[in-house]
Image (cartoon, rainbow, N blue to C red):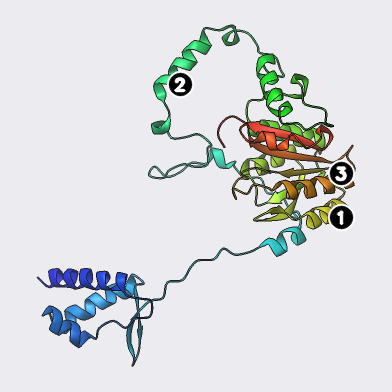
Amino acid sequence: MNQDSTDRILSALRAWIASAPPGAQVPSNRTLVAEHGVSPVTVQKAMRTLSALGLVESRPGVGTFVRSARTARPTDYSWQTTALGAPPARLSALPMTQRAVAPDAITLHSGYPTRDLLPESLVRTALARAARTDAAIHRAPAAGLPELRGWFAQQLAAATPSGITPATARDAFIIAGSQSGLSSIFRTLVGPGQPLLIESPTYWGALLAAEQAGVVLVPVATDSHGPDPDDLARAFTETGARAFYAQPTFANPTGIRWSAEHGRAILDVVRDHGPSSSKTTGRTTWRSMRSLAPWPPSTRTAVSSTSGH
C-alpha cells in the first residue's frame, strides 16, 4: 500500500515538474502530505527518488526546486588538433571491424546494414543472376569492368567546366571497397613514413587505411565550414606533405559539405604548394562526386562509393 502511494505521488509530481519552469519551487512536504493524504515518510521517499533521477535539487533551509536543464555543449578541441600534430607513437590494435561486441549491442562499425533493412529476396536474386555470368568463373579486369569505369567517368565529365580536361574511362578504377582504394592511394601518393595531411575529425576507415599504409598522419582541424585554409597552408609548409585527405561532401562523421567558395580556397592552397606534387584526396558518394569535377585532375584523386556511406 505504501509503495502504491509513493508511485502515485511520483506520477503526480513528475507531471507537475514537466509543466513547471526550471527553478520552480516544489510544494513543501507538509502541503504534499495534506494534498495526497499520505504519511511524511512516503513523501520523503518520493522526493529522494526525484532527486536521484535528477529532476529536482534540494537547497537546505530554502526548499526543493525543479532542476534547471543544462544543454550539453560539445568540447572544442580544434585549437590543439593542428598544434599537437602527429602522435609520437603508433600503437598496433585490432581493427574496429574485427572487434567482438556484446550480444545485445547493435553493431554500427562494420559498414553493413542490419539484415532486417535489406531487400533479401532481391539481393539473393541479384547474386544468382551474377553467378550465371562469365564473371563468376573468370577473373575480372584488374582496373574494373570497362562499362562501369566509363559510367563513373561520364558522371564526372558531365559536370566538368570548360577549360578542364574531363575524366575518361582510363582515369577511373573499380576497387573492392573505399578502404582498399584509400590504402592504395596513400601508398602511391604518400608512401610509408611520409606525412599525410588529414582533416580532423575524419572517416575512421581512412585512419585505418593510413595505418595499413604506414603513413604519418598530420591532423588539420575542421569546423562547420571545413578545414581552415590558413591552417592547411601552414601544415603543408611545416611538414612538407604532398597529400591532403578530405571529404568535401557529406563528411563522415560531421556531415559537413563545403561551399563552392570554401572549396576554391582549399584548392588554391593545394595549387600554391605545387600542383605537380600536391594531391587532395576526397572520399564521397557517387551521387555527390560531381562536386569534385571542377577540381583539375592534377590536384585531386576522388574515391567514390556506391554503398551509400
Residue 289 at what x, y percent from top left? 67, 34
Quadrant location of the N terminus in the rendered image: bottom left
Q: Which mark is residue 271?
A: 3
Q: CA distance from mark 2 to mark 1?
A: 50 Å
Q: Earlier in the sequence, mark 1 or mark 3?
A: 1
As helix, strand or loop, the secondary structure at mark 3 comes to: helix
Look at 41% across and 75% down and name the residue there: 68
Pick whichever, 302 or 46, lies toward us: 302
Q: Is residue 103 left or right of residue 294?
A: left
Look at 77% across and 25% down and name the residue there: 167
As helix, strand or loop, the secondary structure at mark 1 comes to: helix
Q: Is residue 152 left or right of residue 108?
A: right
Q: Quadrant of residue 248?
A: top right
Q: Quadrant of residue 51?
A: bottom left
Q: Nearer the viewer, mark 3 or mark 2?
A: 3
Q: Amino acid at mark 2?
A: Val
Q: Residue furthest bottom?
A: 61
Q: Is residue 80 left or right of residue 130?
A: right
Q: Which residue carries the number 1 mark?
A: 238
Q: Which residue carries the number 2 mark?
A: 123
Q: Earlier in the sequence, mark 3 or mark 2?
A: 2
